Amino acid sequence: MLEERARELKWKLLMGDVAIVFAALTAAYALRVALPGTDQEIDFRLHFSMLPIFLLLMLVSLSYYGGYLIPIKVSPLELTWAVARALSIAFCGLFAIIIGMRLESFSRGVIAIFGVLAFLGVISLRFYYIWNINQSVKKKSDLHKVLVIGTGNRAVQLVNSLRKSVGAEVDIIGYLDPDSKRMDVQLPESCVIGTVGDIRTILKCQVVDEVILAVTRNMFQDVEEIVRACEEEGIKFRIMVDLYDTQVSRVSLLKIGEIPLLTLEPVALDEGKLFIKRLIDVAVSAVSIIFLLPIMVIIALAIKIDSRGPVLFWQQRVGLHKRRFEMIKFRSMFEGSEKKIYALEHLNEAEEPIFKIANDPRITPVGKVLRQTSLDELPQLFNILKGEMSLVGPRPMSVRDVDRFDQSIQRKRFSVKPGLTCLWQISGRSNLPFSKWLELDLKYIDNWNLALDFKIMLKTIPAVLSGKGAH
């Protein structure tokens, strides 16, 4: 809703910020030169050469802290705090570069004046737009006018959601209902102003920016006529896509040739952020393999000396979208122990699909140390490098465990790549019941972002060193 206005406002704010920062630096330079007590000549080119770096830091920080949200959706205090944090980060980055490059000819006076002017300018621009939007709200003719088709619970939910998401900028001009007996019935924000059959007349006589269909599936026979009426008047038409009682995180429209496809995604993953996540996976795993290679060689020798059998253990695990792959680990059990799992089922201490024995007789002496320190997982860096796993994600489960899932929601964990570490790893590991393990996996999937990945990776190191919950 109002996405065009939101995009337009974002670009206006962004271009305004660039202009303000440029003007602020120019004014700061001019003021410092004009002030008495300036003994040394201030290098104009040097100061302006750092402007692109400062702008990049500021714009990224503003975007991260919500500086480009629609002003009416955040309070003036929140906007002020967002601008203050963004500029602080930008100036810290600028000072780090100045100090690192030993650019002693930079004028502290210019930077100080520039900081004050930039802050006042950037925050004033946002307060101006808040005032401008409030003025538009007072003039009813400037509001985005919406006609809702439907009068049931779905229509009421729609209007309430509109009010929460876009505030007072939207004006519900009325509702249409198939039943003429509901004429003039009062509903949130407006009343029933006609039947579905009156749509052409209403669109012709009234100012309408868009029409939204909020009816049950059994009314879809009227959609074609509504679409044609909107097409003739050049008015945008939307359909509520919550046609079924399902939860979706993202809805998108893809056009293949002339065929539009509506996509409902239960898990919303940003492709750009996933690309960055993959770059981090490749870089970190490649560097880690190089640095940890001597340790892995020592572990391999210890395994060979401790017991007979191969150094590495390959097991089929279930990965992204239930694709199977061979996960690599250092062998921590006696050779052939995998085949004994069914004979030991009566000793299983876990009530869920997973298999767990506190003092597993199959584990070798060296294997016990490797599991306690999680060093047996190091070869999975190669799985990450191949793209079968990620640094952070739900732990890959064996085919045996997956076959015993008794709830469909448990398979949602396969909507992302499995990982070397996750919330489970830093929250107690094997001490947690499977239900809690699953809860943490779903929490990670639903709340995933790059910052969460970094947080988990940082907390993994102390969690592994403590050895808590490792079996």
Image: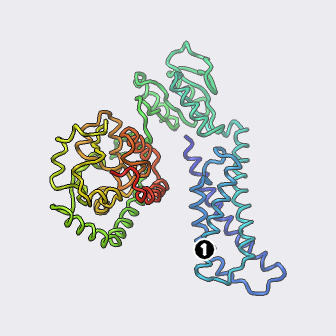
Please tell me how crowded label 1 is: few (under 14), some (14-19), or many (20+) other residues with Cα within 10 Å.
Answer: few
In the image, 103 versus 190, the foreground residue is 103
150 vs 319: above or below: above
Q: Is residue 12 shown left or right of residue 222?
A: right
Horizontal and vertical percent for residue 399?
23, 44
Q: Is residue 467 visible?
A: yes
Horizontal and vertical percent for residue 404?
26, 37
413 vs 79: above or below: above
Which residue position is annotated with label 1? 96
Q: Is residue 253 visible?
A: no
Give the residue at the far right of this rendering: 36
User: Which residue sits at x=50%, y=21%?
Assistant: 197
In the image, 13 versus 466, the foreground residue is 466
Residue 102 lies in quadrant = bottom right
Quarter of the figure with the N terminus:
top right
Disc 1 element: helix
